[in-house]
Image (cartoon, rainbow, N blue to C red):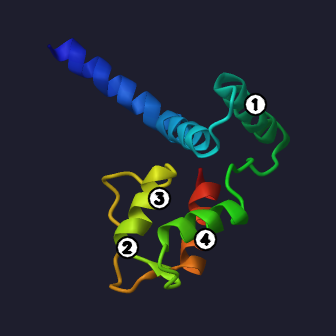
Amino acid sequence: MEARSSRELQARNYLEKHRIMDLLTYLTSALLFFRPERPREYLISILERLRIARLSGVALPFFMDNSNIASMFEMLDSSNKGSISFVQYKEALKTLGLCTAEEVLKDDGHGVTFDKFRNEVNKRTQEI
């Protein structure tokens, strides 16, 4: 029993050290967002761009640009209030793979505006 828990701990540490779960979440989110006809080839192309970005030292390619972020916000803000609820905000971040279920976000009691949503998505994407 001891050996099994030790292996599990080693595996968990390995995944955390190399940020494997972040990568898998990023890839899954991109796949579900774009829904390409050839998903395997699409994932390979993302991994290749990530590899080239790392080797060349340039910024990592992001799968969401401002028009994608605006479209997502508009879908969430179906009544055109100019803001979304905190719950919608957190769920959107989780759906995009930019927030974990365990992460605690601060709710200031106000709706989340498009600018705040866009800035947070961009900031979290860059951190990945």
At 50% from the left and 54% from the top, the residue drawn is: 98
Determine the CA span between mark 4 and mark 1.
25 Å
Q: Is residue 29 above or below residue 59?
A: above
Determine the CA span between mark 2 and mark 3.
11 Å
Determine the CA span between mark 1 and mark 3.
24 Å
Label 1 SS:
helix
What's the residue type where badge 2 is placed?
Phe
Q: Position of residue 113 (x, y in %)?
A: 52, 81
Tell me the quarter of the picture where residue 66 sits.
bottom right
Label 3 SS:
helix
Q: For the residue carrying disc 3, how many other residues have a C-alpha within 10 Å: few (<14), some (14-19), or many (20+)?
A: some
Q: Choose the circle earlier in sequence order: 4 or 2.
A: 2
- Residue, disc 3: 93
Determine the CA span between mark 2 and mark 1.
34 Å
- Residue, disc 2: 86
Q: Choose the circle earlier in sequence order: 2 or 1.
A: 1
- Residue, disc 4: 118
Give the residue at the far front of this rendering. Answer: 79
At 31% from the left and 18% from the top, the residue drawn is: 7
- Residue, disc 1: 45
Res 120 visible: no
What's the residue type where badge 4 is placed?
Arg
Q: Are marks 2 and 1 in contact (CB under 8 Å)?
A: no
